[in-house]
Image (spheres, rainbow, N blue to C red):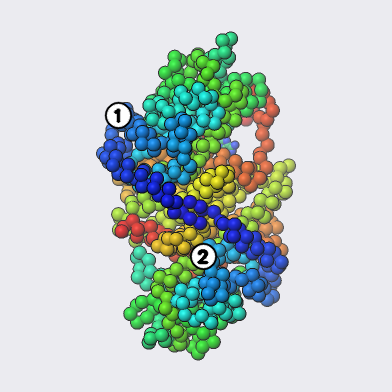
Amino acid sequence: MNFELSDEQRALQEAARGALSRHKTLEAARDALDGGERLDLWDMAREVGWPGLLVSEEHGGAGLGGLDAMLVLAECGRVLASVPLLGHVPATAVLDAAGSHAELLSALADGERRAAFAGAQPPGDLSQEWTADPRRGHARVPAPRAEVDGDAAVVTGEVAWVPDAPGADVLVVAVVDADGAARAVLVDAGAQGVTVEPVVRYDATRLLGHVRLDGARGEVLAAADTELAAAWYLGQGLLAAESLGAVERALEVSVEYAKERFTFGRAIGSYQAVKHALVEVLRRQENARSLMYYAGWARQDAPAEFPLAASAARVAAGRALDFAARELISVHGGIGATWEHDAPYYFRRAQLSRRLLGGMGSATDRVAGELLGQAAA
Amino acid sequence: MDLNDTPQQAEYRAKVRSWLEEHKHEAPVLQGEGAIEDEHEAVEAHRAWQRKLAEAGLTGVTWPTEYGGQGLGPLEQVIVNQEISRAGVPGILDAIGVGMLGPTIIAHGTEEQKQRYLAAMLHGDEVWCQLFSEPAAGSDLAGIQSRAKPQDDGSWVLNGQKVWTTNAQFASFGLLLARTDPDVPKHKGLTMFIVPMDAEGVTVRGLRQITGDAEFNEVFFDDVALDPDLVVGPVNGGWGTALTTLMFERLTIGGGGEGMGYRADRFARALASDPAAVRDPEVRKRFGELATDLLALRFTGYRILTALQRGQIPGPEAGMGKVTVVNAAVAAGDLIADVIGPDAFSLDDEWNYLISFLPGLKSAGGTEEILRNTVGERVLGLPPEPRLDKGIPFSELRDKEREAAGASA
Ligand SMILES: Cc1cc2nc3c(=O)[nH]c(=O)nc-3n(C[C@H](O)[C@H](O)[C@H](O)COP(=O)(O)OP(=O)(O)OC[C@H]3O[C@@H](n4cnc5c(N)ncnc54)[C@H](O)[C@@H]3O)c2cc1C
């Protein structure tokens, strides 16, 4: 039994923190909301080898595991850095599993080209459907449909709020064929019938796009539907990690302030209402960390548990970040509610993240569904 | 990361599993349907089961071999817990003794004490109870008033009262914290004693709980004579001894939530048997949230074990386990009662006990507020609250408290 990070993983973490510390990411988050340009750290990511984290070594990647990618995302989340990995990494995982397109894979691993994953939520215990995120509203929409002929596919449909789609060179799309089977299709972002509409909402560090496919031609990848499902859950795990990183920083800043701000002759951190709330942030943070480890471990060693593990990590981290971001604001009192302070950017990150990739509701339901399904079996 | 057993651990697990397979029909049914009704009979059946587990080497797994333990690591203990839970049989009767009090004696006791008490404790032949809390001192444990006075011949005479003492009704011994010097600040004048529960002057009275059972008691001491060799650890150094017990207590409750049966898969089975519940979005949401917490607890447990196994002190993740498990289990009981309806409260229903036991568990072994104070101060480094009892001799403290209560009345 060993359920801690390895020395290599700690080194990866430290290197990531070091690389990110050279950029003024929080100022950039504020500037971007004020209409400035989003600080895109893709070039930095390339220098440190993140685009190829999950690509196997034979294709020029680092051949690392899901947990390693999560650790990197957590470091990005700490400082609200905008590095388009949330869409890129799951896409490369599907391509790598398919085993074809060696040249494209090595360009993606190097970061010379960028990919995004237009994923679909896999069927659960109550529904057999693959569903995509809608533009607006509560109802999920069917994943794009594809006419498949050998390796060729013609795809029609829409996936909204796809992370990192704007600017991506290729898209890996989860589609459903005429027989109702899920397939992975590789589509060139510049191909005819493909539209990527960039959308910025509330958190300007987040690169999002609505992907529309109108009879777009693509190539069917030799990846099983289980790989498509795994890529969806990898997205859940990465988003969880990114949120966990943001919780860590929010807690550090809150605790620091609680020690130095005095009211009624005492540090505010000595008051139980403040102390207990900060301990609650810590409790949620550590629970989320344990589940992130679970997700990383399950992806590698217990794939049947990965849907449960990644969904649970997402739920724990999403709830933790919402709580931590609100606490960060209230511990700071008035100053915490101002545009000048960093707290609002963590809050914005928390609120938008909770609604992406199926939203917290779907993830919570999936935790229940996986366990109830197992219990009924 | 690796959750798999090493070859040696796999072999150990197989051995444990096959023993349990072979003997599980000898285990008593203690809860739910078909449970033994008579309390005395249930205790004796449970005691006999502990003895069997002990003879098979399945209790005191981490204890040193010279005291009847197996001398194995925390991981082997977890393997035993997992296999016991998998086999669906009860664990040991004296979890308090074996989990908390025995380890305290191992850490602070004399060689004679270890030889005399530990093996009988492991086998359930002599059950132990924890005589710490008093009517006026629970969270503020160092405020206890039970008084042990030294005699000329080196022995002690004990007077006072303890309360909420689990298992005192059938315990042979208790580990008791008493005040031995009232003229120094309250943490300084305490001493730990072993008290034979059949000594003259010891009276045990059962207290019924929310469950309807009387699992805890009040215990009175009237001029109880204690031999000098019943002192555990240094005289007037009892606070340090007590902290050892409390540390084991938190590990037992926080890390052992799954061992106590508060597991996501168990609750899932209860819900899955009701098809309407399975389809209800509200049920699914509530279950998804509480199951997430229970899963987190399991994997936090593996992090703690990893640290222990490496001889490290567990990190911040260890402190809040009890809060997580109790609140998640409360939410589970609440949800299951909503699904089943009033029948969940029928006496022979397994959920009746769980639902009624949990509100008390919130206080047992340190309340949520106290745990949050401790973690906030020790882990986050937040400043403590101002205290009004620092540096004041205990004998003067009670008067001050009485004065303050009078002034506000
Ligand atoms: C089922 C059960 C079994 C038990 N078994 C045993 C046993 O075997 N042996 C034993 O010795 N004891 C046992 N206990 C006692 C248990 O340890 C105490 O109940 C617990 O420590 C709380 O002490 P108290 O009851 O005196 O409550 P108090 O300490 O009076 O607390 C009352 C309330 O005040 C709050 N409070 C107190 N101080 C603070 C503070 N500084 N800040 C914020 N809030 C505060 C508490 O959180 C609580 O809500 C058991 C209790 C239960 C319920």
Name the side, left or right, on which A296 lies relative to B172.
right
Cα distance, mark 1 to mark 2? Answer: 53 Å
Name the side, left or right, on which B31 lies relative to A267.
left
Residue A57 sits in which quadrant? Answer: bottom right
Q: Which residue is mark 2?
A: A66
Q: Name the one closer to the observer, A341 or B364.
A: B364
Task: Please report contact status of discs 1 and 2: CB closer than 8 Å, yes or no.
Answer: no
Residue at horizontal 38%, vertical 69%?
A: A123
Q: Which residue is mark 1?
A: B41
State whether residue A204 is above or below residue B390.
Answer: below
Residues tagged by mark 1 and mark 2 found on one chain of the structure: no
Residue at horizontal 51%, vertical 88%?
A: A191
- Foreground mark, 1 or 2, reads 2
State whether residue B312 is above or below residue A94.
Answer: above
User: Which chain does tag 2 point to?
Assistant: A
Q: Position of residue A176 (x, y in %)?
A: 39, 78
